[in-house]
Each structure stands twice: as C-alpha cells, then as structure tokens.
C-alpha cells in the first residue's frame, strides 16, 4: 500500500490489541519509572541467543532492575563473531510491544476470549481425542521454524503416531539442499575468509544477513581476494564486490553451465581431484559442449567474454576459489530449474578441487547432541508416510522428508487429509504462496492451535492461541546452529521474568503431550533433557549456562574423504537421479514461466530481504519499521528505462496484477536491476489487524504467487511469477 508518514508516538506504542487481557505490568513497561528506579541498579549480563532471525546469533543480554537494557554480540560464536545486526537490536524491543499476546486465547463466535492454560490444554486434548475417534492419527500435523526445541515437537507428532511434522523448508531452501545432497551427499559451508576468489550467485549475506559471512568476505577482500556477485539486482553484497553480473533472473543455470564449459574445454579443472573424488566427468564432457558462453549469453544476458574471463579467473585461484553454496535467493526454492542450478554450483566447485579444502567449500563441524533414550522411551512413530509425498518415487522423490512440503498443508487440509494442526514460530498465512488458498486450507481445519508471541495472520484465525514467550523470557533446548571449523553448542536462556502470562516453548510442547494422552514420552524436565543431550559432548550444562557458547569435538582438517553419496564421491553423474527419471548430468532447463517480451507491462516478480527486516516477522517492530519509512524502503524496484516506457516517475504508485493477486505499491527507479524483472522487498504486506505498526504497509510477493510445487523437489518456485504493471 501507499507509503504513510510514520512516527513512533508514545500513544501508538502503548495502544494494546483488543484481544489482550492481562493488565500491563506498568513497573516493567513504563520506561520513565524504570529508568529512574534503575539508575543505581546493578547490571546483570546473561548469555543467550538472539531470536531476531534463524541465525540465532550468540549474545549477552544486559539486565537492569528486571528490564533488558541492551544486547551485545558474543565474540566466541562462530556464526556472528561478536557482532549483531539492526534487526537484532530492534527486535529486542518487541519484548515490551503492547501488541503481544498476554495469555492463552480461545476464539468464540469470531472473537478471542482469554482462558487459563489448564482450560486451553484440557480442551485441546479433548478435541484431539474426539477427532481421533473418527480419523487416523496422521490427520494431525505440526509446522514450525526449524529449531532444536522442535526435536520435542517431532517427538510429540511421533508419540501421536503422525508423520506430519513440517518446517518452512519448501519456501526457503529445499532445492538448494537437494542439489547439494544429490551431488556431495551433504550441504557444505563456505570458507570465505580463506578464499582468493569468491563468486556468489543470488545470495546476499549483507542484507539476507549472515554476519560471520560478511566479516569473512571483508577479511578476504582485505587480503586481496576477488569477489563477483551474480544477481539481477545490484544487491548490498555487490557493493563489496569487484564485479556485479546482472544476470537475467531464472537463468543462472545457463551461466554456470557455460563456466563449466570453459573450465572443461580449456582443461582448467583440478584433474587430480576430478580423478580421485568424482564420478561422471566423462559424461559431463559430452554434455557440456552444448553450452559454450556464446550460447549462454543469449539466455542469461551476461556477455560471453565476461563468462569466459570470470571462469578463467576462478580456475586461476583454485583450490582457494569457490562458488558460494547458496541459500534462498537464486536457487533455494525459486525456479523450476533451481535443483539443477544447485547441482551445477556443486559440480563447478568440485572442478575447482575445493571440496573440504581451505578457502573452498567445507563440511563444517556441527555438534551431534545425545539422545534421551534409554532413559526415556522413544515413541513408536508414524504408521504411514507423509501425505505430501516427499521422498516418494512418483511424487516428490527429491524432496526432503524431514522438512516435508509445508506449503502443501492447505491443499491437504482442503482434501480432508489433515484435520488438526499446530503452528509454532511460523506464519503460513503470510509466508506461504497464495494467501487466499492458504486461508481456505487453514480455515478448513477442525482444530488450529497457534503458538506465537503475536497475533500473526495465522494466529488470528486459530481456534486457540498459546502465547509463546519472547526469547529472553525463557530457557529452551540446547542449540547447535553455530557450526564451523569447530562445532559449538549454545543455549537460549532466560534473562528476565516473563512480562505476560507465557510459558516456554519446551513447556508448551511437553504439556501438550500430557494433555494429548502421551505424557509417558514427556516425563522429563528441560534441565534433565538438556543434560542428557549434552552428555556425549563432554560439556556440562552449568558451564554452558555461564558461557552461552562452548566449542565441542575436533577441529576440522582439510582433505576430501569418502562422501555420503552412493559412490562415496562427488556425483557429477548421478545414477540415483537417472533411476528416478531425472537428468543424471545437469542440463539446461528453462524457468517455468517468462514475461512477455512484446508487452511493456509484463515483468517477472523477484524479491529479497532487506537488512532491517526478517521475513514478514519484524514489520511490526516499530524501530525497524521506522527505518523502512525513514529511508523509503517499502518500494518496488524497477529498471529505469522500462519504468520510463510506462510513464513512471520515481515514487509513483503502480498497480501490480498476477494470475492470483492484485496490489498497489510505489516504485523505486534504478539502473541496478535487470530490465526483465521487478524486485519487491519481502518484509511487508502484513494483513493481521492486530499488528498495529505493520498493518497495511506494502505488499508481499506471496500475494501474487500461485500455489506451485516443483515437480521433483516440491518447493514453492517462488520466483515463477509474471506480473503486469500499470501506473495507478
Ligand atoms: N535481513 C534479513 N536477513 C535474513 C533473513 C531475513 O528475513 N532478513 N532471513 C534469513 C533466511 S531464513 C534466509 S533463507 C536467508 C536468505 O538469504 P538470501 O538467499 O541472501 O536471500 P534473498 O534476499 O531472498 O536473496 C538473495 C538475492 O537473490 C537475488 N535473486 C533473486 N532472483 C535471482 C535469480 O534468479 N538469480 C540470481 N543470481 N539472484 C537472484 C535477489 O535479488 C537477492 O538480492 O537470509 C537470512 N537472513
Ligand atoms: N512474505 C514473505 N514470505 C516468506 C519470506 C519472506 O521474506 N517474506 N521468506 C521465506 C523464507 S526464506 C523463510 S525461511 C520462511 C520463514 O517463514 P516462517 O517460518 O513462517 O517464519 P517467520 O516469518 O520468520 O516467523 C513466523 C512467526 O514466528 C513468530 N515467532 C517469533 N519468535 C517466536 C518464538 O520465539 N516462538 C514462537 N512460538 N513464535 C515466534 C513470529 O511472531 C511470526 O508470527 O518464509 C518464506 N516466505
Ligand atoms: S542476524 Fe541479527 S536478527 Fe538474526 S540472530 Fe543475528 S543479530 Fe539477531
Ligand atoms: Mo529462509
């Protein structure tokens, strides 16, 4: 929607939601009173993890007189290396956001009413048991943002004998992961700091923030490394680069195949590595002759000489040369060819001989937590496979079974396969494609329970909302996400008393287990579970509580060993893919849809992160939204020459229309974008009226994206959108 003037007024900050009930604890929420009382108060420093995004940077929370005062990065952590981003600082203040859910809620005649935790659990448990009298156990599901806490959510689904545990993977990374898994058996990390040459394809760590990666890139650049950024848009990481390659969106595969062509034809590859650690190079040689740079130039719009020059530069620095493993932007879950693009990235790296090498891509050390058994029994587990078809021949055989295809949940609900669900740290109504369809699907459920600190779009239609604590209010399960040259374990810890009537995620999951009749699998406390999980790592919970981050296990050493693929080597040629009916060697595959080149109004809609927002989750954080308004960030990027053909000036309002959606937004004219597309920041378009700061600001790419499933992996293909643009 149109840009509105924005100021953080004390009135809007303190205005609560209609649904909230428990009175504000003014002792904690009134800044002035707190500031006066805390002037002389001692400062407590608590190590914990930021929850402003999935990076979960290690931090210290500084607490004064019961209130969080500021946070600081923990230098020991692999991931953030002592620094924090604006989202982390800004999101912290949502602890005191009056829009928070203040106690359990039940929807009665379309309105939320406060109820006690005990009543909520009792009613949810009874409803599920009644539903299960008529339906099989696999009609229950749980979907969440992947976090260690959720080992217990998976346990809950398994205790209920349902296979239906999902993450957001199908809208984020499943094509990238599958491409790597089918090629090297595992997803590597990037040893950016030690690289001499880095090419990044549609990954933007400077705004799709990864703080450690940005630090490493800066360090490598200081040591003389070259950086090439491939992106239809001159993104924030390109600012650090030697060269920006403005690729036509959806055609990175052509660019990569042509680079492979140059490296193979000119024999610039690491012959020893290829000989010892790969299978299928001969077949690659036969296929790759079809993709010379002159061919690629016509497909991807990067000049043939540039492709050849960059390929030679890259090979010249091998093995301390890498193509970034990717994440979301170009081939996480975007295009029909994303899986093949990820394969091409993996193969190009292997030709550089850089797999598990310093300055290349390496298999980071990640902590392997212990199990709860034999002390606590393992649930019997599901009786049938997932209904979404992940990992099944004939359905989505390349999909990740553990993640499932969460954007299929609405379809499964509409078909009556799912009847009852739990949504935890996930907001499918806003983060899944095609909201009308998602709303129809989730509304069809006979029971929807949402666990969230806020009344998100999804929470707004739930039967029950269980208020999650804000991250600094609760102790949770030990975390392992700070992988690196040496594995680390980390601990999300409570720094302040809960402001509202919330319970920890761990407590909610285990208490739901008890209410749902499977309490025998949840007879442990968080403390006991955390201790059991740390046991094989040789570190104590007490030590972890004090430090926040602890290194565990051996330090990584370079050298490619036996890989976790059927051949034990890099599978340039994959017999598994051949057996499943997919190209065993990457070959060109066009994106599913393309804009009409004859129509000046037709564009591909692409999107991406801005540094001050996480998904659509922080749009309601007033400090972060203030940055958006201050710098006029809620705008659609459009190539200047194309905008002028449509009679558009900078800041004009346009109408965007796709097969499934319509919306209005102001434009930003730029030379820094490929002319075939428009680019939308992905952090806006909140339509939950309970989120008073974010409501009705901007639009979301999901508004325009039809419900699609990549035929092999099942991901959302979230940049396969053609829109028409008209001046509004
Ligand atoms: N600020 C911020 N940081 C985040 C997050 C966040 O929401 N906000 N989320 C975290 C999460 S969950 C993720 S998955 C990562 C995502 O991190 P990234 O993968 O870096 O995320 P994006 O910004 O979606 O995409 C990166 C770039 O891909 C470009 N792109 C789009 N289409 C194409 C294409 O066809 N080809 C090429 N070459 N480039 C293309 C976009 O213009 C964008 O600049 O960020 C993490 N960090
Ligand atoms: N519109 C839009 N859609 C997207 C993206 C985007 O940038 N914009 N990005 C895509 C990508 S890369 C990803 S990874 C997915 C992510 O999408 P989702 O997995 O849906 O995650 P988020 O949007 O980050 O957060 C969802 C909800 O978690 C709640 N939450 C925050 N902290 C907690 C907590 O501690 N406990 C609990 N229980 N809840 C909490 C937030 O209030 C929010 O309502 O979305 C994909 N789809
Ligand atoms: S990147 Fe920023 S928001 Fe994400 S965890 Fe780190 S500090 Fe928090
Ligand atoms: Mo993501």
Image (spheres, rainbow, N blue to C red):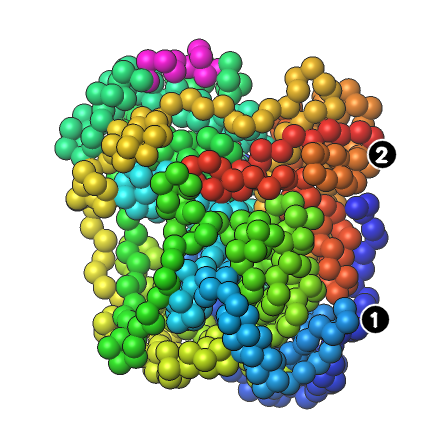
Tell which residue pokes out farthest to the top in this image. Answer: 294
Identify whether 454 is placed above or below 86: below
Q: Is residue 343 visible?
A: yes
**Mark 1 residue element:** helix
Is the residue marked by circle 2 packed among few (<14), some (14-19), or many (20+) residues within 10 Å?
A: few
Q: Label 1 vs label 2: CA separation? A: 33 Å
Residue at image point 23% right, 46% down: 564
**Residue 118, picture quadrant:** bottom right
- Residue 577 at x, y percent in the picture: 31, 33
In the rendered structure, are the residues bearing label 1 and label 2 in contact, judged by CB atoms less than 8 Å apart?
no
Whether residue 459 sits left or right of residue 662 in the image: it is left
For disc 2, the marked residue is 728
Q: Residue 11 — which label?
A: 1
- Residue 572 at x, y percent in the picture: 27, 30
Identify whether 55 is placed above or below 453: above
Q: Which residues are magenta?
A: 288-297
Identify whether 529 is placed above or below 565: below
Q: Residue 29 — which label?
A: none
**Mark 2 residue element:** loop
- Residue 411 at x, y percent in the picture: 57, 49
**Residue 616, picture quadrant:** bottom right
Q: Is residue 146 visible?
A: no
**Residue 600, picture quadrant:** top right
Is the residue marked by circle 1 packed among few (<14), some (14-19), or many (20+) residues within 10 Å?
A: few
Residue 574 colored in magenta in the image: no
User: Quarter holding the C terminus?
Assistant: top right
Name the foreground residue: 287 vs 665. 287
Residue at image point 61% right, 45% down: 433
């Amino acid at each position: 929607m149109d840009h509105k003037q924005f100021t953080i007024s004390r009135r809007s900050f303190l205005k609560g939601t209609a649904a909230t009930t428990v009175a504000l604890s003014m002792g904690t929420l009134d800044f002035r009173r707190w500031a006066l009382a805390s002037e002389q108060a001692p400062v407590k420093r608590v190590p914990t993890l930021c929850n402003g995004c999935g990076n979960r940077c290690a931090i210290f929370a500084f607490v004064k007189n019961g209130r969080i005062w500021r946070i600081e990065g923990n230098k020991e952590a692999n991931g953030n290396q002592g620094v924090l981003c604006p989202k982390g600082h800004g999101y912290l203040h949502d602890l005191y956001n009056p829009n928070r859910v203040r106690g359990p809620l039940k929807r009665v005649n379309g309105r939320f009413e406060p109820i006690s935790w005990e009543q909520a659990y009792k009613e949810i448990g009874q409803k599920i048991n009644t539903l299960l009298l008529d339906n099989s156990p696999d009609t229950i599901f749980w979907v969440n943002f992947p976090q260690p806490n959720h080992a217990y959510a998976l346990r809950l689904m398994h205790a209920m004998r349902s296979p239906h545990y999902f993450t957001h993977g199908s809208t984020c990374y499943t094509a990238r992961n599958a491409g790597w898994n089918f090629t090297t058996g595992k997803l590597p990390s990037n040893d950016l700091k030690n690289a001499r040459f880095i090419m990044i394809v549609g990954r933007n760590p400077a705004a799709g923030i990864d703080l450690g990666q940005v630090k490493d890139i800066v360090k490598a650049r200081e040591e003389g490394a070259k950086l090439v950024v491939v992106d239809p848009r001159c993104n924030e990481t390109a600012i650090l680069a030697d060269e920006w390659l403005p690729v036509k969106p959806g055609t990175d595969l052509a660019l990569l195949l042509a680079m492979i062509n140059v490296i193979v034809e000119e024999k610039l590859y690491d012959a020893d590595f290829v000989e010892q650690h790969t299978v299928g190079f001969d077949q690659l040689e036969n296929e790759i002759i079809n993709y010379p740079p002159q061919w690629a130039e016509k497909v991807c719009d990067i000049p043939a000489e540039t492709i050849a020059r960059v390929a030679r530069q890259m090979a010249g620095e091998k093995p301390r040369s890498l193509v970034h493993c990717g994440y979301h932007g170009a081939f996480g879950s975007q295009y029909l060819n994303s899986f093949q693009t990820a394969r091409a990235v993996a193969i190009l790296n292997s030709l550089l001989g850089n797999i598990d090498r310093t300055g290349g891509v390496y298999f980071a050390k990640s902590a392997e937590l212990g199990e709860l058994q034999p002390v606590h029994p393992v649930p019997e587990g599901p009786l049938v496979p997932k209904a979404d078809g992940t990992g099944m021949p004939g359905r989505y055989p390349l999909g990740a079974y553990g993640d499932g295809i969460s954007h299929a949940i609405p379809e499964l609900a509409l078909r009556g396969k799912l009847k009852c669900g739990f949504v935890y740290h996930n907001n499918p109504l806003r983060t899944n494609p095609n909201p009308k369809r998602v709303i129809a699907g989730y509304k069809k459920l006979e029971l929807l329970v949402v666990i969230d600190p806020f009344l998100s779009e999804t929470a707004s239609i739930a039967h029950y909302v269980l208020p999650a604590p804000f991250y600094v209010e609760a102790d949770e399960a030990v975390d392992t996400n700070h992988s690196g040259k040496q594995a680390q374990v980390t601990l999300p810890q409570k720094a302040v008393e809960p402001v509202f009537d919330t319970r920890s995620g761990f407590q909610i999951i285990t208490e739901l287990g008890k209410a749902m009749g499977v309490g025998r699998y949840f007879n442990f406390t968080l403390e006991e579970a955390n201790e059991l999980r740390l046991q094989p790592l040789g570190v104590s919970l007490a030590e972890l509580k004090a430090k926040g981050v602890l290194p565990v296990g051996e330090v990584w050493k370079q050298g490619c060993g036996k890989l976790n693929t059927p051949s034990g080597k890099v599978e340039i040629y994959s017999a598994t893919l051949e057996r499943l009916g997919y190209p065993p060697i990457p070959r060109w595959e066009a994106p599913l849809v393309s804009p009409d080149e004859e129509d000046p109004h037709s564009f591909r809609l692409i999107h991406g992160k801005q540094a001050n927002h996480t998904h659509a989750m922080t749009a309601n954080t007033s400090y972060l939204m203030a940055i958006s308004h201050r710098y006029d960030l809620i705008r659609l990027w459009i190539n200047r020459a194309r905008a002028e053909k449509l009679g558009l000036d900078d800041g004009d309002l346009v109408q965007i229309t796709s097969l499934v959606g319509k919306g209005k937004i102001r434009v930003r004219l730029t030379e820094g974008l490929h002319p075939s597309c428009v680019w939308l920041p992905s952090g806006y378009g909140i339509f939950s009226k309970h989120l008073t700061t974010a409501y009705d600001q901007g639009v979301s790419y999901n508004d325009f994206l039809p419900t699609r499933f990549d035929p092999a992996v099942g991901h959302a293909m979230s940049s396969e959108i053609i829109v028409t643009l008209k001046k509004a």
